[in-house]
Image (cartoon, rainbow, N blue to C red):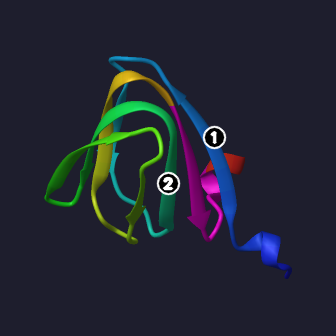
Amino acid sequence: MGYDDHIMLVKVDFKAGAVGQLHEHHHSQVTYVESGELEMTIGEEVRIIKGGDSYYVPPHVLHGCVCLKDGVLIDVFSPYREDFLA
């Protein structure tokens, strides 16, 4: 098993008003906000994130977002998301 088997990079486009429903998963997630503005909930914390920001979501922590201005997120998951490949 090579290094590439352990991570997955996903680029997500959000339009203003779009909602990333609150959810949790066993993957570690690091996200870079390429552009836009979102209200991000991670556990009990809610904050506004903008282009140039980044954040970490530990495994099994409830998280989700509401897009305030069109934008793009770059998510990195470890291990890779098998459910995205189905």
The residue under the point 36% across, 58% down is: 24
At which x and y percent is residue 6? Answer: 70, 73
73 vs 65, left or right, is right
User: Is residue 86 in sight in this rendering?
Assistant: no
Left or right of 22 on screen, residue 12:
right
Instruction: State left or right for residue 27 relative to residue 46.
Output: right
Crowding at mark 2 (Cα within 10 Å: few <14, some 14-19, many 20+) = some
Q: Residue furthest top?
A: 16
The magenta segment is: 72-83
At mark 2, the secondary structure is: strand
Question: Which residue is labeled 2 in the image?
Answer: 31
Q: Taking 32 as reference, is 77 above or below it? A: below
The image position of residue 68, as x and y in percent, is: 31, 23
Q: Is residue 82 magenta?
A: yes
Query: Which residue: 32% across, 18% down?
Result: 17
Residue flagged by tag 2: what amino acid is it?
A: Thr
- For the point 85% across and 79% down, the residue is 2
In the picture shown, does residue 14 fall above or below 58? above
Q: Position of residue 57 (x, y in %)?
A: 38, 64
* Separation of residues labelled 1 and 2 (CA atoms): 10 Å
Amino acid found under the numbered disc labelled 1: Lys
Q: Say which mark, if any, is on residue 11.
A: 1
Work out which residue is located at the far left of the displayed protein and give it: 44
Q: How many marks?
A: 2
